[in-house]
Image (tube, rainbow, N blue to C red):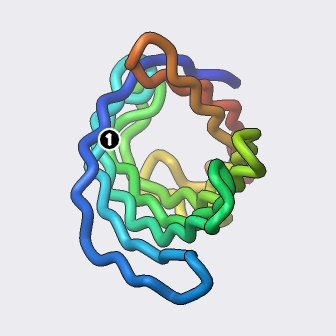
């Protein structure tokens, strides 16, 4: 199954720390609102490291999403793993196994994110396990 839509995101910087050799580590909170087949809100806690080399770094994050997915109500967690290698991004955004609640029990899948013209879009490929 696949769900596609748009989402808004608000970044709330928390802490940033210079860890030496020109690298920094920062913690940010993001509040999101999803529209379309995924009608939900979420809170993301992200830990990011920026290297001293322009365009290189990485982040990890945990996200709790609550709302409806194609009319099924519940919540679930996503795990983010992002790398930026001298400007070339890669992102793995996966449902944490067995975190779906209520009508989303058994949910598994991946979300792809695209940013175009300042807007954020998601494509959620998912299914349910018995």
The one nearer the camera, 91 or 65, is 91
- Where residue 126 appears, as percent x and y from the top left, is 68, 36
Q: Position of residue 8 (x, y in %)?
A: 30, 30
Report whether residue 94 is seen. Answer: no
Along the line of sight, the residue nearer the viewer: 1 or 29:
29
SS class of the residue under badge 1? strand
Q: Dividing the picture into quarters, in which one does residue 39 lie? A: top left
Q: 20 above or below 1?
A: below
The answer to whether residue 87 shows anywhere in this view is yes
Which residue: 30% across, 42% down? 32
What residue is shown at x 25% (from left), y 71% (from top)? 14
* Residue 11 left/right relative to 7: left
Whole-percent x and y of residue 48? 52, 67
- Residue at left 43%, top 11%? 117
In which image quadrant can residue 128 be found? top right
Is 3 left, or right, of 84 in this rendering?
A: left
Image position, residue 52 (x, y; %): 62, 67
State left or right for residue 69 relative to residue 58.
left
Residue visible at 41% across and 72% down?
26
From the viewer's side, name the closer residue of 122 and 69: 122
Q: Which residue is mark 1?
A: 67
**Extreme top residue here?**
117
Q: How would you rate the neighbour count of disc 1 (Cα within 10 Å): few for under 14, some for 14-19, many for 20 or more?
A: some
Where is the N terminus found, in terms of image quarters? Answer: top right
> Which residue occupies the extreme bottom position in the image?
20
**Count of marks, rendered view:** 1
Image height of 77 relative to 124, above or below: below
In the image, residue 117 above or below residue 65: above
């Amino acid at each position: 199954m696949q769900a596609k839509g748009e989402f808004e995101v608000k970044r709330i910087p928390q802490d940033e720390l210079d860890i030496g050799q020109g690298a920094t580590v920062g913690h940010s909170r993001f509040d999101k609102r999803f529209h379309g087949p995924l009608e939900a809100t979420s809170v993301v806690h992200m830990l990011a490291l920026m290297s001293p080399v322009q365009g290189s770094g990485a982040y990890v994050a945990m996200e709790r999403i609550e709302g409806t997915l194609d009319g099924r109500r519940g919540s679930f967690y996503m795990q983010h793993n992002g790398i930026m290698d001298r400007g070339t991004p890669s992102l793995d955004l996966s449902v944490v196994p067995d975190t779906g609640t209520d009508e989303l029990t058994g949910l598994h899948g991946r979300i792809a994110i695209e940013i175009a013209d300042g807007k954020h879009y998601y494509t959620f490929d998912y299914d349910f396990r018995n």
